[in-house]
Amino acid sequence: MANAVRKSSQAFRTISEVAEELDVPQHVLRFWESKFSQVKPMKRGGGRRYYRPEDIDLLRGIRTLLYEDGFTIKGVQKVFRDRGVRFIIDTGKPGANRTELPREHAKPAYVEEDADVATPKSDSAQEKARHLTIDQRRQLDDALGELMQLKSLLQAAKGSAALTRTVEDDSQAEKRSA
């Protein structure tokens, strides 16, 4: 992007531009969009996403909570409910005072999904998560995004297989009754 024309700060950005600016893969942005209903980029023909400056600020706040403060997806969702969109946007601003963040929402991402959001699995696990580098967090987030995509594919295939079995069962039942 070294040769790219510099856009106005108020210009809309494509998903690739936002991914580069926030240093996260595009599929992670799409994943966050599915987990945080507050993220609503404009979509044009063919489903192409265009992010407004306030969308990017919100994504930056989400990224800060997840990657720098060690929050889980559920933890960030709880912060949205408890503190609102403006708080998350402010959290992502450079030099933001994050001492008022509710630390009970921060915990390692590998704690069971059904566990209480405010209860870390153990102090040592939480301590290990705090010492992950940004690159390690990015790698884990990439792996999570890929796993979520695979899960969706498996669920779709399972649903398709069930539908196929139902059609085959109906067809066999018709043959037996004929």
Image: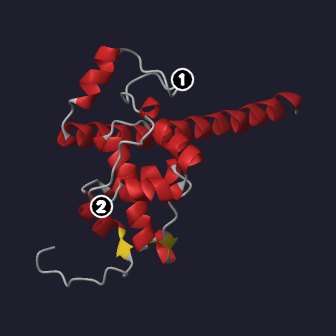
Answer left or right for 120 relative to 157.
left
Name which residue type carries label 1: Asp
**Viewer-side label of 2, 1:** 1
Instruction: Examine the image and state in which quarter residue 26 appears.
Output: bottom left
Q: Quadrant of the N terminus?
A: bottom left
**Crowding near pointer 2: few (<14 within 10 Å), some, many (20+)?**
some
Classify 22 as above or below 159: below
* x and y percentages locating residue 73 in the rendered image: 45, 39
Scheme by which the image is coloured:
secondary structure
Name which residue type carries label 2: Ala
Answer left or right for 18 relative to 132.
right
Instruction: Examine the image and state in which quarter residue 146 appears.
Output: top left
Q: Which mark is residue 116?
A: 1
What residue lies at 61% left-to-right and 38% top-to-bottom? 159
Residue 153 visible in rendering: no
Classify 116 as above or below 143: above
Judging from the image, what secondary structure is the residue with disc 1 in?
Answer: loop
Classify 124 as above or below 46: above
Q: Earlier in the sequence, mark 2 or mark 1?
A: 2
Outermost residue toward the right in this view: 177
What residue lies at 36% left-to-right and 81% top-to-bottom? 11
**Crowding near pointer 1: few (<14 within 10 Å), some, many (20+)?**
few
* x and y percentages locating residue 175 in the rendered image: 80, 33
Residue wearing tag 2: 19
What residue lies at 42% left-to-right and 41% top-to-bottom? 101
* x and y percentages locating residue 136 in the rendered image: 20, 37
Answer left or right for 108 relative to 47.
left
Judging from the image, what secondary structure is the residue with disc 2 in?
Answer: helix
Instruction: Examine the image and state in which quarter residue 166 appears.
Output: top right
